């Protein structure tokens, strides 16, 4: 199966736009969200600027994976306790949309990494992947429960 060509500039731009929209309502997200996402976007700009650098695109891909985990934690902890309003819902929706698109972006960036000559021979094994998936499902489940209980109180 051939992976469709997607421009790295488009990936960086979409994540920058979604991060800026997520930061419109500033009081609900902690500084770790801003710092992590904008630092990863800086690595994305580095990967765009150095087209032949394997290190730049690898750092961008690893940074996106780290921000996926961090975003899940931050959204689970701070989403339910924030003020409810139209601007908050828009900001939260953009943060969630950014989180949803990050694994897809990692998929495309990995293929760009391989095209640039990168080689990833790490075999994590089925057990680690299953354990990681179970922990992510648990974190998302707890986040959904907190959101629904917060919405019940409205």
Image (cartoon, helix red, strand yellow):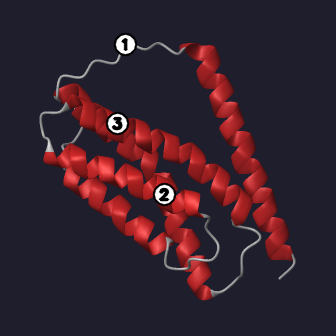
Regarding residue 107, the answer to whether it shows in the image is: no
Label 3 to label 2: alpha-carbon separation: 16 Å
**How many marks are shown on the rendered structure?**
3
Regarding residue 120, the answer to whether it shows in the image is: yes
Give the number of the disc on residue 135. Answer: none
Q: Secondary structure at mark 3?
A: helix
Q: Position of residue 137 (x, y in %)?
A: 69, 41
Q: Image check: 45 left or right of 94?
A: left
Q: Are marks 3 and 2 in contact (CB under 8 Å)?
A: no
Q: Quadrant of the N terminus?
A: top left
Q: Looking at the image, is mark 3 or mark 2 earlier in the sequence?
A: 2
Of residues 38 and 21, the one drawn nearer to the viewer in this rendering? 38
Give the number of the disc on residue 35. Answer: 2
The residue sitting at 34% across, 18% down in the picture is: 120
Q: Are marks 3 and 1 in contact (CB under 8 Å)?
A: no
Of residues 135 and 59, the one drawn nearer to the viewer in this rendering? 59
- The residue tagged 1 is 121
Q: Secondary structure at mark 1?
A: loop
């Amino acid at each position: 199966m051939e992976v469709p060509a997607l421009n790295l500039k488009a990936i960086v731009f979409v994540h920058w736009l979604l991060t800026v929209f997520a930061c419109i309502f500033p009081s609900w997200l902690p500084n770790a969200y801003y710092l992590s996402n904008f630092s990863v976007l800086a690595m994305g700009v580095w990967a765009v600027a150095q087209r032949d650098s394997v290190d730049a695109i690898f750092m961008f891909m690893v940074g996106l994976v780290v921000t996926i985990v961090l975003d899940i934690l931050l959204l689970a902890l701070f989403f339910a306790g924030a003020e409810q309003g139209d601007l908050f819902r828009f900001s939260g929706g953009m943060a969630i949309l950014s989180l949803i698109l990050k694994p897809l972006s990692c998929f495309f960036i990995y293929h760009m990494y391989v095209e640039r000559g990168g080689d990833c021979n790490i075999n994590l094994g089925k057990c680690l992947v299953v354990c990681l998936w179970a922990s992510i499902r648990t974190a998302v489940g707890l986040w959904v429960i907190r959101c629904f209980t917060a919405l019940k109180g409205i």
